Image: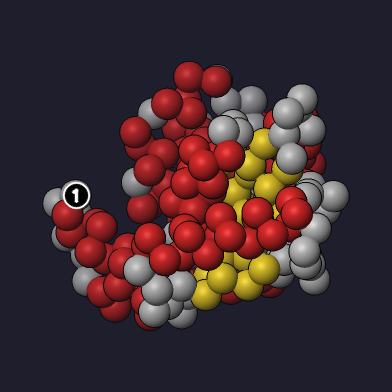
Amino acid sequence: MIIAVDGPTASGKGTIARALAEHFGLPVLDTGLLYRAVGYQTQLNHGDPDDAADALVACQFPASLLDDPALRFESTGSLASRVSVHPPVRAALFQRQVDFANQPGGAILDGRDIGTVIAPHADAKLFVTASAEVRARRRHVEMLSRGVEVTYEAVLADVRARDARDTGRADAPLLRAPDAMLLDNSDMPREAAIAAAIAFVETRLRGDG
């Protein structure tokens, strides 16, 4: 069983993907972490994340980088959004994601093009979203809890900039697959969103819809 979970930044798709993985006993891959690693490695290389050649070189990052806490920094998320617009970078990371999706027994992947590009054959697809204002508010609270001094306005501007890059890129833009469940959790508690996602996947497995 393959489950694709797509959505914009700070939408809660990672939380839902991990909950689904625990519920159904499947391995999960945060594909955004791969792009964060490329973005961070570009910075370590003193390269330009907006330059396709520099970003492509960074695709050779060491596997140990995926465990670096710096990949979770807000600044690294912005770097990931910038390197992900380059088609050569997406091509370099494509097979790694496809292999994970197609492993025996199935898997869950969360990202921005899982249901449309990486695993269009997924058994269940979800598109998790929330308004930009809600996503920015959640991210702002999270950052403040980590001791990061930033204004809500700055976070909202960053969220909107990432949305524009993700939906506007020519190669594998952020899109809801036609057969994906739209899960807008702007006004939903975390537990309710997870329950809705699980119910949808179980319905798909039964073939009810």
Question: Is residue 138 positioned above or below 146 on the image?
Answer: below
The kind of secondary structure element at disc 1 is loop
Viewed as shown, does residue 104 lie left or right of 19? right
Q: Is residue 196 left or right of residue 10?
A: right
Q: Residue at x 18, y 59 (%)?
A: 144
- Residue 116 vs residue 197, the one in the foreground: 197
Colour basis: secondary structure
Look at label 1 and name its amino acid.
Arg
Decide if residue 61 is in sight here: yes
In the figure, residue 57 lies in which quadrant?
top right
The residue lying at 72 percent from left, 66 percent from top is 180
Question: Is residue 71 or residue 98 the one in the foreground?
Answer: 98
- The reply, left or right, for residue 152 in relation to residue 4 is left
Q: Position of residue 106 (x, y in %)?
A: 72, 34
Residue at x 39%, y 79% (from the top left corner): 187
The residue located at (19%, 49%) in the rendering is: 146
Q: Position of residue 204 (x, y in %)?
A: 73, 57
Q: Which residue is mark 1?
A: 146
Q: Quadrant of residue 165?
A: bottom right
